[in-house]
Image (tube, grey):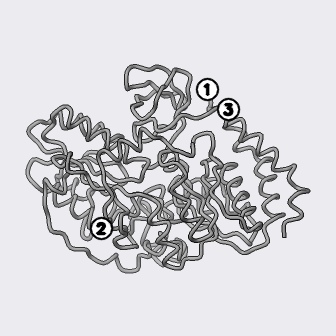
């Protein structure tokens, strides 16, 4: 089996110790750094990054898990559509277990609903072609990393004149929620910015965070050394008082991003107000399908009036997504709420703060 | 679901590529990239290659790691 070049170097224990001791040596100020990417949440737990840091540095997990921030109203809507006659719901795997207000797609599937897990949005189009007498609805969730794939899928569906495919968009963009956290007064002294979101968007979108709030932003890779290195770069910025946008993950992220992907997203989606679990509606933080592609918009094809319902009793998922509380602060954590029987969304996805804390708890 | 994984391109056919992750071959869409050649490394996400991995930059990052150690003297001044 051929390995990815350099992968061993990024996990080399001596290197990790060296970077960690540099961080210990220069970190003086008490700081809180937040990551806003499920991949980072997992990596930080998997590699034990917190244990390598001095007590001056606290790491917060933010709203970076797309499944976790999906609103209950969206799940409820997907279930209502799935209950209609001749509908097939297609979805990325994690989402089927997320509790809505009274059920989940997984439970509904057990009751006979046709819910199919797909790895790619394109798989949903294949299912639509194979089932011409049924309506195939793809649950489009995810940030800027996933939205271009949905965009291309819709463009192809239109080109091939597919009439039985639509997408229920809960796609979200990162910058508004990163600013919202600061507006809500959460103490964030530096952002570990998402590597693969930034590969698509480029780095210019982080400039307002630096300019308006004087908070350093470092775009990080996903290996142990990447994350530690990014934390070191953040500490340097904090200690020297010179916040700026820096890219640690240069092997993948270009400052202008992936312009083809950006163009596809713009072609199909326009910014829209979007509900986030734990936050409520954040202006211009979502992506709605443009009029030119409206026949593929499941929101228009299946117009439904939905009502928001409160979070389950005792679940603090909303506060965890804001970095205000940690999974261990929840009285349901690892007791009433486990990956096998999740109460809240943060325990469902493997990228969720609760699921990652549960999996890697010692 | 949001995870991106590095994959090696084995073959290219139009907007599709055969890519390998840990010895297993997958089909990936390469519409989002300009030019993809066998031997390139890409980040695979939800069936799409979203960006190439720049090997020169990967080597440069390793060099920067090594530089971390030699920064010691300079950083003693930061207070």
Instruction: Say left or right for A74 vs A208.
Output: left
Q: How far, Cα to Cα, is label 2 from label 1?
A: 43 Å
Q: Which chain does the numbered disc 3 sit on?
A: B
Query: Sequence order check: which comes first, mark 2 or mark 1?
Result: 1
Q: Residue A41's mark?
A: none
> Which residue in the structure is indicated by mark 2?
A72
**What secondary structure is marked by label 3?**
helix
Coordinates of residue A38 in the picture (x, y in percent) = 50, 56
Residue at point 56%, 30% (across, down): B41
* Left or right: residue A332 compared with residue A123: right
Is B44 placed left or right of A6 in the picture?
left
Residue denoted by label 1: A2
Which quadrant would the N terminus of chain A be assigned to in this image? top right
Work out whether disc 2 and disc 3 sit on a shared chain: no
Q: Work out whether A191 lies above or below A115.
A: below
Which label lies toward us, 2 or 3?
3
Chain of the residue under the numbered disc 1 shown in the image: A
A220 displayed left or right of A318: right
Callout in the foreground (2, 1): 2
Question: For mark 3, what is the residue?
Answer: B56
Q: Quote the CA–CA distance across marks 1 and 3.
A: 19 Å
């Amino acid at each position: 089996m051929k390995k990815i070049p350099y992968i061993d170097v990024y996990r080399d224990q001596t290197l990790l110790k060296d970077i960690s001791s540099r961080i210990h040596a220069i970190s003086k100020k008490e700081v809180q750094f937040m990551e806003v990417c499920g991949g980072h949440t997992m990596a930080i737990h998997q590699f034990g990054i917190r244990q390598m840091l001095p007590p001056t540095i606290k790491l917060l997990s933010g709203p970076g898990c797309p499944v976790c921030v999906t609103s209950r109203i969206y799940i409820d809507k997907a279930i209502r559509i799935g209950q209609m006659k001749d509908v097939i719901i297609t979805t990325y795997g994690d989402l089927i277990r997320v509790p809505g207000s009274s059920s989940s797609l997984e439970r509904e599937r057990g009751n006979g609903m046709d819910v199919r897990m797909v790895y790619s949005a394109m798989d949903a189009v294949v299912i639509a072609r194979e089932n011409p007498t049924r309506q195939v609805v793809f649950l489009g969730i995810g940030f800027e990393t996933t939205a271009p794939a949905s965009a291309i899928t819709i463009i192809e569906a239109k080109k091939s004149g597919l009439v039985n495919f639509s997408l229920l968009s809960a796609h979200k963009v990162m910058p508004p929620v990163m600013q919202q956290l600061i507006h809500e007064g959460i103490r964030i002294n530096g952002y570990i910015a998402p590597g693969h979101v930034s590969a698509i968007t480029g780095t210019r979108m982080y400039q307002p965070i630096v300019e308006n709030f004087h908070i350093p932003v470092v775009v990080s890779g996903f290996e142990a050394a990447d994350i530690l290195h990014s934390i070191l770069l953040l500490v340097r910025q904090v200690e020297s008082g010179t916040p700026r946008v820096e890219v640690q993950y240069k092997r993948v992220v270009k400052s202008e991003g992936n312009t083809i992907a950006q163009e596809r997203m713009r072609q199909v989606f326009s910014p829209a107000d979007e509900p986030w679990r734990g936050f409520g509606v954040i202006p211009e933080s979502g992506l709605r399908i443009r009029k030119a592609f409206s026949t593929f918009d499941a929101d228009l094809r299946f117009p439904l009036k939905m009502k928001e319902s409160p979070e389950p009793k005792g679940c603090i998922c909303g506060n965890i997504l804001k970095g205000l509380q940690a999974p261990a602060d929840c009285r349901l954590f690892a007791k009433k709420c486990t990956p096998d029987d999740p109460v809240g969304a943060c325990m469902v996805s493997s990228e969720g703060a609760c699921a990652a804390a549960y999996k890697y708890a010692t | 679901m949001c995870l991106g994984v590095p994959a090696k391109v084995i073959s290219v056919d139009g907007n599709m590529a055969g890519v390998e992750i840990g010895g297993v071959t997958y089909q990936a869409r390469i519409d989002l990239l300009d030019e993809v050649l066998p031997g390139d490394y890409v980040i695979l996400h939800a069936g799409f290659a979203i960006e190439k991995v720049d090997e020169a930059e990967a080597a440069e990052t390793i060099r920067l790691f090594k530089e971390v150690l030699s920064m010691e003297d300079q950083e003693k001044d930061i207070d």
